[in-house]
Image (cartoon, helix red, strand yellow):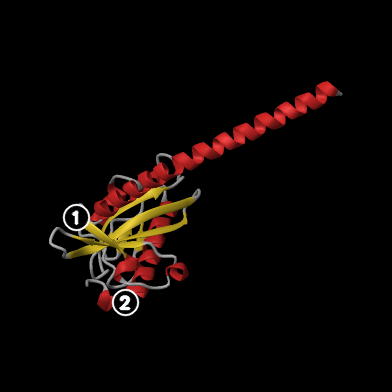
Amino acid sequence: MKTTLHLIATLVAVGLVAGASLSLVNGWAQPLIDANETKVKMAGVMEVVPGGAASKPISEVAPGPASADNLEAYQVLDGQGQVLGWAVFGEGTGFSDKIRLMVGVSPDLNRTLGIKILKDSETPGLGTKIREGAYPDQFFGRGRPAPGLEAGPLTVVKGAAEAPNEVQAITGATISSKAVVSIVNESVSKLRSRIGQGEAGR
């Protein structure tokens, strides 16, 4: 009986020490993790709006009910303080799991400038092509003019894109392709609602 109680007491003590240690390590490491994530995020903001030198969170440019529209976006400026465009974050469901991305759009919100996939669990070799290569190149305007949003939301086509608002799907990964475009459309729509078309380039 005494041996059993001693064993239980020892296990409880070890558990308490381990729990406290993990808590201390987490408390020390979390700020570093958060700082690194912020650094990666801000580098991505400049990537999707080429030529950017500085950025302002949307809360400074267009204060509003951030919790209501769940919008994270940054106005991107060049070295002289001129607005180059916006970087807006979005999230939605892909083929396998959630896709999180940021997309760069022109100051008038009518044309994409670039895209960066931040998180996904799409099918290796197929859906993962949303990250690099010909598919994301379309949003940067590499090879053809970047997709335009002026005539309406972006749409996905299986063949070569012809209309200004068309994006060519990845062969064998149409669902992933459509998921990205859907997230982009929703994110830009939220940004337009938040800042208003007339305020976009200010």
Q: Residues within 10 Å of mark 1 (few under 14, many from 20)?
A: some
Residue at the disc numbered 2: 196
Sooner in the amino-acid sequence: mark 1 or mark 2:
1
Residue 112: image x %, image y %?
26, 61
* Residue 175 percent across, percent down from the top left: 45, 54
Q: Is residue 110 above or below residue 31?
A: below
Q: Are marks 1 and 2 in contact (CB under 8 Å)?
A: no
In depth, the one of 33 and 162 nearer the eye is: 33
Q: Residue at x 42, y 45 (%)?
A: 31
Split into 4 quadrants, where in the image is the N terminus? top right
Q: Is residue 171 visible?
A: no
Tell me the SS state at disc 1.
loop
Foreground of the two, 91 or 167: 91
The percent position of residue 135, horizontal first and vertical second, equals 31, 50
Distance from Cα at disc 1 to Cα at disc 2: 24 Å
Please tell me which residue is depicted at 20% across the width and 54% down the height of the picture: 50
Q: Which amino acid type corresponds to the residue marked 2 in the rendered image? A: Gly
Residue type at numbered disc 1 = Ala
Question: Image height check: is 155 above or below 134?
Answer: below
